[in-house]
Image: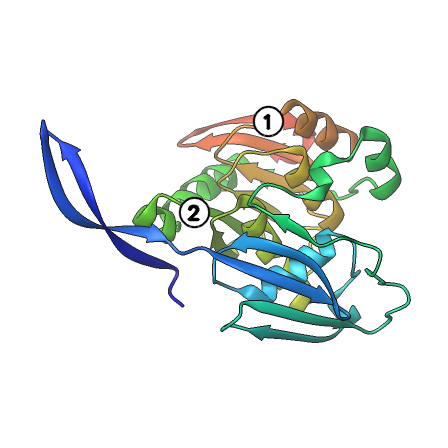
Amino acid sequence: MKESTTVSILRYTQNRFFAREDPVVTEITLSIAVNGTVLAEIICSPLEIREFVTGFLFSERLIKSSKDLDALDIDTEKWAASVATRTKKDFDVSQRNARFITPGDLSSGRLSPAVYAQRYTKVKSKTFISSADVHTLGTLIQSRSKLFGKTGGAHSAALWNGKRLLFFSEDIGRHNALDKIIGRCLLEDIDTRDKTIATSGRLSSAVVAKVIHAGFPVLVSRSAPTERAVLLSREFGITMIGFARGQEFNIYSNAWRVRA
């Protein structure tokens, strides 16, 4: 299935209506079953499904690494992912109810501060990022977002190693795009502790929670953060940068990692 399709529309411009074909992003509902139990049905884009499922399960704390996956089968006709974990006793999801998840509706975004403290540990990394790299990432997120440029309906996420862009993913959901990067890091055994994650979307507490859990020390976005996201990034050692556009950006937490 293609990442986008075209639909017939009427466009109004210069006081006139025009008939035209317009590209829109493709949307699927992906069912994820773990050890025979349906865990979730998620609205997402039909791209990098294996990476997405892996990252999602990690973010949901159902796996600790890709080594926990015994099998991951994707049915692209029914859009169903069937996952088997190696240690079924430790990763039992039989007590969970299947959830229908829309982009942006992740469980971590509903956690209380006390639960965050119990679930996550502070990210300890001496990695630095230069202001030039922040400028580069802001530009790359915009220029590499081909699906967004084509449809206006996608978010993107990227992984930066201090010298070059390693991975880039797009999806209709900002959380989904981030999970794809996390999943690929797990599948390719990439060390996250010295990497920067960049995103096009708003920085919510759910986004920051994923970054903390994955161990990324630096988070850059072209968009804005929420109050809880700022507090969370400060508490757990994340350097969070927002509004990275052109030659300007805002540092919301742990500014010591950013060099002019």
Q: Nearer the viewer, residue 73 or 132?
A: 73
Q: Residues within 10 Å of mark 2 (few under 14, many from 20)?
A: many
Q: Which residue is depicted at the point 54% across and 44% down?
A: 174
- The image quarter containing residue 64 is bottom right
The answer to whether 195 is drawn above or below residue 238 in the figure is below
Residue 96 visible (yes or no): yes
Q: Residue at x 75, y 73 (%)?
A: 84
Q: From the viewer's perspective, tell me whether residue 5 is left or right of residue 159.
A: left
Mark 2 vs mark 1, CA separation in Å: 25 Å
Q: Nearer the viewer, residue 22 or 117?
A: 22
The quadrant of the image that shows the N terminus is: bottom left
Residue 186, label in figure: none
Query: Which amino acid does the dot numbered 1 rest on?
Result: Ile
| Mark closer to the chain start, 2 or 1 | 2
Q: Which mark is residue 251?
A: 1
| SS type, badge 2 | loop
Image coordinates for residue 223, horizontal then vertical, percent: 50, 32
What is the x, y in percent for residue 44?
Answer: 52, 54
Residue at the extreme right of the image, as rendered:
89
Q: Which residue has dot 2 on it?
A: 154
In this rendering, the answer to whether 141 lies above or below 202 is below
